[in-house]
Amino acid sequence: MELLKQKIIAEGQALSESILKVDSFLNHQMDPVLMREIGKEFARKFQDSQVTKVLTIESSGIGPGLMTALELGVPMIFARKRKSLTLTEDLLTASVHSYTKKETNEITVSNKYIEKADKVLIIDDFLAVGQAARGLAEICHQVGAEVAGFGIVIEKAFQNGGKELREQGYKVESLARIKSLEPGKIDFLNTEVIHNV
Ligand code: 5GP
C-alpha cells in the first residue's frame, strides 16, 4: 500500500535491527485518513471472505480494526490485555508474550461476542513472531469460530510470524512488508510477491 509505505519512509524510525517505531501515525498518535485507507484496503482484500466479526487487540489494533469493520459493515471486538472489572461474563483467554514489551499478558474476550457461527478477520498493527496473532486465533478456535485470515498493517518479514501462519494455511494480507531494519534504514519487500510466499 503506497500511502502507508510513504508514511513509514517519512516518519518511521528503525530503533534497532528489529524494532520499528511508528508512534506518529499508528502506535501513539493515529492518522485518521491513513486509518480509513487501511480499513478500505483490508475490506477489499477480504471482501469475498464472508467476514462476520473483526477481532483485534488493544490498543494499536483498534484504529485499523475499527476502520476495517466499518468498511465491511460488521462489529469489531478488541481483546483486552488486562482483565476489566466490568467483564464479568465467561471469558475466552489466551497467553500472549509481547515482543516489544518483554511481558506476557493473559488476553481476554467475553464469550458473548464471538460464537461458533462467526467468521473472524484478525487485524493487528504489527506482525513479528506471531504471538499476538496466534493468541487471537486461539480465542476464535476455543468457541469453534472460523478464522477468515489476518490483516496486518506492518509485517516484519525477517521474523517468522507471517511465514508460519501462511504455512499453516491462513490467508495473511500485510499492507507493508519490511525486509530488514537497521538504525536509519528501512528496507521493504515488494508487496506484490506476498501471495507467492
Ligand atoms: P508478535 O506477537 O507478532 O511477535 O508481535 C506483534 C505485536 O508486538 C504487535 O501487536 C505490536 O504491538 C508489537 N510489535 C512487534 N514488533 C514491533 C515493532 O517493530 N514496532 C512496534 N511499534 N510494535 C511492534
Image (spheres, rainbow, N blue to C red):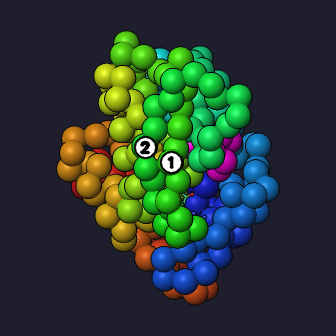
* Residue at the (58%, 87%) spot, across then down: 183
Tell me the crowding category of disc 1: few under 14, some 14 to 19, or many 20 or more residues within 10 angstroms, Cα based.
some
Q: Could you tell me residue 67's position as x and y percent? A: 65, 33
Answer whether residue 137 is magenta in the image: no
Q: Are marks 1 and 2 in contact (CB under 8 Å)?
A: yes
* Residue at the (65%, 50%) spot, across then down: 60
Tell me the crowding category of disc 2: few under 14, some 14 to 19, or many 20 or more residues within 10 angstroms, Cα based.
many
Give the residue number, with chain letter if any, for mark 2. Answer: 94
Which kind of residue does numbered mark 1 sit on? Answer: Glu
Looking at the picture, tell me which residue is in the foreground, 10 or 57: 57
Vertical side of 119 occupied by 180: above or below: below
Residue 50 placement, left or right of 60: left
Which kind of residue does numbered mark 2 sit on? Answer: Ala
Which residues lie in the magenta part? Answer: 56-63
The image quadrant where one finds the C terminus is bottom left
Vertical side of 53 occupied by 165: above or below: below
Identity of the residue furthest to the bottom in this view: 183
Answer whether residue 61 is magenta in the image: yes
In the rendered structure, find residue 106 and report the number of the disc placed on it: 1
Compare marks 1 and 2 and give the one earlier in the sequence: 2
